[in-house]
Amino acid sequence: MAAGLACVVLLGSTVGWASTTGLRAAPSPCPTRSARASRHSSLVVASSSGVAQPADPIRDVTLRWVERAVVGLQLCPFAEAPLRSGAIAVATSTALDEDALLADVEEQCAALLAQSSDDVATVLVAAPNLRANFADFQDGLGALEDEDVFAQAFPAFADQIMVVCFHPEHQWAGLATDDPVNFEKRSPFVIVNLLRTSMVDAAIATGRTVGIGERNEARLRKTGIEAMRTMYAGLFAADPPPSPQRT
């Protein structure tokens, strides 16, 4: 892998650009991290398989987001297969701050590598209680998207795992807050996507990732801000409205 990925990785593939710090910009510097955060949170882990599982509204909203936004709008050409096969795990974190979420991320990195890629291709760590504003978020957790920053924070998982961070208020530098392109990295709540580096490399090698950023931009602009807002509001409803049509 080249240092400083030139694309955002989602669910085992590349979908956009490298950083939450700005449109096609370099990542922010590494945040100061306590030597070992004390546990402030607990995890409930579930997968996208069709097997009946205990009710978990956060898991349901997260998988709805993947199905309706990521797959439904074709933002990631590699997301549908693991979604349909049940190989996407959702870890619901009750973290209230970044240190607690980092501890959960570390735990889930180990859990991901303990499973085969056929069983668990990727993990989405959802943190619905984390209320960090986007500016603070991109300077903290968002910096982990840089491979060197991630390696400093989690040396045991360097070269094996990569992360992509999503935020409900994500805004690319140079774009207005109501630009629909911002929804490329907006999520219903804070989500940290853990990816196997080997699967990212394999996705890039297929050549299908070329031009994804441009296609996503065109598709989101055509969909429009109102349709995106309606779809995201529907993620929390029992019977959400249909996703905008694929184009």
Image: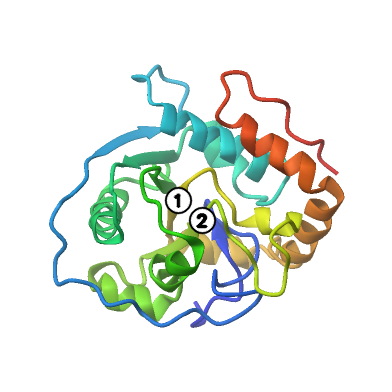
Q: Could you classify mark 1 by the number of other residues whose Cα lies within 10 Å: few (under 14), some (14-19), or many (20 or more)? A: many
The count of marks equals 2
Q: Could you classify mark 2 by the number of other residues whose Cα lies within 10 Å: few (under 14), some (14-19), or many (20 or more)? A: many
Kindly identify the residue that appears in the image at 57 percent across and 55 percent down: 169
Give whichever of 34, 205 is nearer the camera.
34
Does the CB distance between marks 1 and 2 fall below 8 Å? yes
Alpha carbon distance from label 1 to label 2: 6 Å
The secondary structure type at the circle numbered 1 is strand
Label drawn at residue 166? 2
Kindly identify the residue that appears in the image at 43 percent across and 68 percent down: 136
Mark closer to the chain start, 1 or 2: 2
Q: In this view, does 109 lie to the left or right of 171?
A: left
Position of 175 relative to 118 (above/below): below
Label drawn at residue 52? none
In percent of width and height, residue 213 lies at: 72, 65
Q: What residue type is labelled 2?
A: Phe
In percent of width and height, residue 226 lies at: 78, 42
Kindly identify the residue that appears in the image at 49 percent across and 77 percent down: 1
In percent of width and height, residue 178 lies at: 73, 56
